[in-house]
């Protein structure tokens, strides 16, 4: 029986953001934008969705008078990512 | 990345792989600092040997003192530069954070040994301790970065550190130290640099 893929993660940009954050401690919005080649607007929307699902933490602050958004994966996010990867492996039969 | 599109499982895997690879470059070290410090340490050791032969200056450890002053100036400059830049890193990794802290510990221990050498500790024991500390630092780097050349180099450096205890001439002591700089710093540094360039 195949597990259902998490709809929050089964989206190109949200999955890309989570895959980036899983390997680092925290990353700025600019870093995520550069690595995913996404538009600022689209990235903001997807980050908000990940935040609402409590998969990431978002800290907004000011650095040298410029707004700065820092994203960090949460324990819940790590768990969801692992489950998603395991489900993918089941689908592709690569375990 | 464009707007939402239906995604197959294979595409999902491709995204995960690409993004993890992109983030992996943040964890990689380009080996530059190992190369710079390695060449400096090797040069100072060999300049000290040459000074022993040609007697350019009376002080045996003249080049070491010069190196010490240079290091202090470099650290001061780096410190000021970092303060002025106010941490411009757009991404923080556990690897980088760990090394920042460990580097502080390494340099404090290094300074403590040098202080001991300047207040009566025999250079034969002092340089042995220094090489032993290099080995420990190189081993940590090798283990955390999963970089085998550094792990091997660390154990060779420990053998060289033990060798220092049996050396009876400053000249030979400098050769052992130069060998430690070459094996522990320079060779792994170039190998790390080569691997870094290959991955970007």
Image (tube, rainbow, N blue to C red):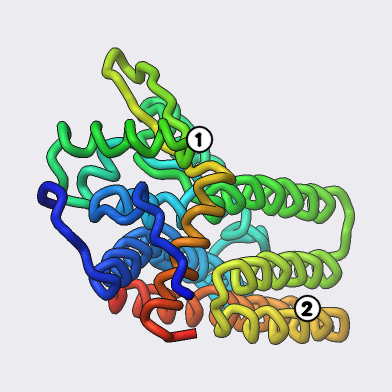
Picture coordinates of residue B156 (x, y %)? 69, 86
Q: Is residue A16 left or right of residue B168?
A: left
**Which quadrant of the figure has residue B88?**
top left
Picture coordinates of residue B12 (x, y %)? 29, 66
Q: Secondary structure at mark 2?
A: helix
Residue linked to disc 1: B76
Q: Secondary structure at mark 1?
A: helix
Q: Earlier in the sequence, mark 1 or mark 2?
A: 1
> What quarter of the picture does the C terminus of chain B occupy?
bottom left
Picture coordinates of residue B2 (x, y %)? 10, 50
Vertical comparison of B140 with B198: above or below: above
Does the image show residue A93? Answer: yes
Front residue of B196/B1: it is: B1
State the count of labels.
Answer: 2
Residue at point 41%, 62% (across, down): A4
Vertical comparison of B4 with B24: above or below: above
Does the image show residue B171? Answer: no
Picture coordinates of residue B33 (x, y %)? 46, 61
Residue linked to disc 2: B161
Residue at point 77%, 71% (across, down): B132
Q: Disc 2 is attached to a residue of which chain?
A: B
Q: Disc 1 is attached to a residue of which chain?
A: B
Residue at point 76%, 80% (across, down): B158
């Amino acid at each position: 029986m195949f597990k259902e893929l998490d709809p929050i993660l089964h989206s190109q940009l949200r999955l890309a953001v989570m895959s980036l954050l899983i390997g680092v401690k925290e990353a700025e919005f600019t870093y995520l934008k550069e690595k995913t080649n996404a538009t600022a607007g689209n990235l903001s929307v997807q980050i908000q969705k990940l935040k609402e699902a409590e998969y990431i933490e978002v800290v907004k602050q000011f650095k040298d008078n410029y707004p700065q958004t820092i994203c960090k994966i949460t324990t819940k996010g790590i768990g969801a990512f692992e489950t998603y990867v395991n489900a993918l492996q089941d689908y592709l039969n690569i375990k | 990345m464009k707007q939402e599109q239906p995604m197959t499982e294979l595409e999902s895997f491709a995204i995960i792989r690409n993004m993890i690879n992109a983030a992996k470059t943040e964890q990689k070290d380009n080996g530059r600092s190992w190369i710079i410090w390695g060449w400096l340490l090797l040069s100072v050791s060999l300049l000290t040997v040459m000074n022993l032969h040609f007697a350019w200056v009376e002080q045996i450890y003249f080049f070491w003192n010069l190196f010490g002053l240079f290091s202090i100036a470099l650290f001061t400059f780096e410190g000021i530069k970092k303060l002025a830049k106010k941490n411009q890193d757009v991404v923080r990794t556990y690897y980088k954070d760990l090394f920042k802290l460990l580097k502080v510990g390494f340099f404090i221990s290094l300074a403590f040994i040098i202080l001991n050498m300047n207040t009566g500790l025999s250079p034969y024991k002092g340089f042995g301790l220094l090489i032993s500390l290099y080995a420990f630092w190189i081993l940590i780097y090798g283990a955390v970065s999963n970089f085998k050349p550094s792990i091997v180099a660390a154990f060779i450096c420990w053998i060289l550190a033990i060798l220092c205890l049996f050396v009876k001439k400053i000249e030979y002591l400098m050769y052992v130290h130069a060998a430690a700089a070459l094996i522990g710093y320079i060779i792994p540094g170039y190998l790390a640099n080569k691997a870094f360039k290959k991955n970007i």
